Each structure stands twice: as C-alpha cells, then as structure tokens.
Amino acid sequence: MARKAMANKPNWRAIKIHRSYTVDETSRALGVCKPTVRRWLKSGKLAVIDSQRPALILGSELIAFLKARRKPKQRLRIDQCLCFSCKAPRSAAGRMAELVQASISTFNVCMLCETCERPIYRRYSARQIRALSEKLRVSASEAIRHLIETAHPCLNVHFETGGQDIGKAPSEE
C-alpha cells in the first residue's frame, strides 16, 4: 500500500461537521501524523468530546481549530513585491522599477529589495501601471526577443573541414 505524503497545510474541507473523529481518523483525513494530532489535543487548543478513550474530536471543533491556525493572507501595496530572501513584502530600493511588457495587457516589473538589494519581481496589468508610476519611477525596457521573432536569424553555417575551404561560406548551388 502506497503511503500518502504528509500535508504542509491540513485541509479543513476534508472534515465533516457532524461527525466525530478519533486521533487515527483525524490524522488520515488531514494527512498529518498521529503525534501531531495528539500535540494539538495536549495543548488544549483542540477539545475532545469527553475524557474517555478513544479520544473523540467533534468535526465542527476540528474545523474551527484548523481555521484559527491559518495565517491571514498578506495584501501587497501597489509599490511592493514579495522578497523571497527576506520572506516579507518589500518596497523598491531607490523608488525605481524596470518595466517589461509580457503581453498586450500585462507587464513584468523588476525592482531591487530595499533591505537585501536582490531583484524582486511582480506582474501588473496595464491599468495598474499608472498607479505604480505615481508611486515609483518606472523605466520601460524592451523585452528580450526570441530567435523566431528576429528579422535576421543567426547564420551558423557548418564549414567544410580541410584545406582552403576553412572560413569560407559554402557555395549556393
């Protein structure tokens, strides 16, 4: 039998409200280890139905416990990006950003983190760029072109090896 990988964040949607769960059933439903569920019970933050064994956990209590453990989503301001080095939202160093058009309606913006000075990136829609330009000095640069998009493709020609023909382009016949 293949073992299910442990979950990073237990999914509270796997729990039914009107059902009671044992420690084993809770660990299987959420994809966490049994000792983890026992730690939750021992901390007193997760309540059991009664003090008898096996310990039974009411589904509604389990859902409330898991929702209380969630971190609130961070909303970034228009002039901030998430820096993966600092693990926090950061503004641009020097209040400057570089703008590259990704498609007709979206732009990739590169800034330097104000703390660690590493590049941080964020994608903006065309209508968000005006609000961004009010907060930062935005400089636009042209996107790197792919080989297919260029008018003059690279002429890598395989030359014949030997004698006088080295360095000469092959003749067109």
Image (tube, grey):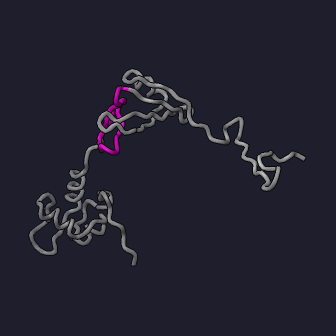
Residue 128, compared with residue 30, is above or below; it is: above
Q: Residue furthest left?
A: 51
Q: Which residue occupies the foreground of this view, 105 or 37? A: 105
Q: Residue furthest front?
A: 163
Q: Residue furthest right?
A: 173
Residue at 45% from the left image edge and 30% from the top image edge: 98
Residue 28, compared with residue 127, is above or below; it is: below
Quadrant assignment for the N terminus? bottom left
Side of 76 relative to 145 (left or right) = left
Side of 143 relative to 23 (left or right) = right
Residue 160: quarter of image: bottom right
Q: Horizontal and vertical percent for residue 35?
A: 20, 69
Residue at 36% from the left image edge and 26% from the top image edge: 95
Residue 115: quarter of image: top left
Residue at 36% from the left image edge and 70% from the top image edge: 4
Side of 57 relative to 5 (left or right) = left
Residue at 82% from the left image edge and 50% from the top image edge: 165
Q: What is the total number of numbered labels drawn onto the structure image?
A: 0
Q: Which residue occupies the foreground of this view, 38 or 160? A: 160
Residue 160, compared with residue 40, is above or below; it is: above
The part of the chain drawn in magenta is: 75-95
Q: Horizontal and vertical percent for residue 125?
A: 47, 32
Q: Horizontal and vertical percent for residue 108?
A: 48, 35
Side of 16 relative to 107 (left or right) = left
Residue 123 lies in the magenta stretch = no
Q: Residue furthest bottom?
A: 1
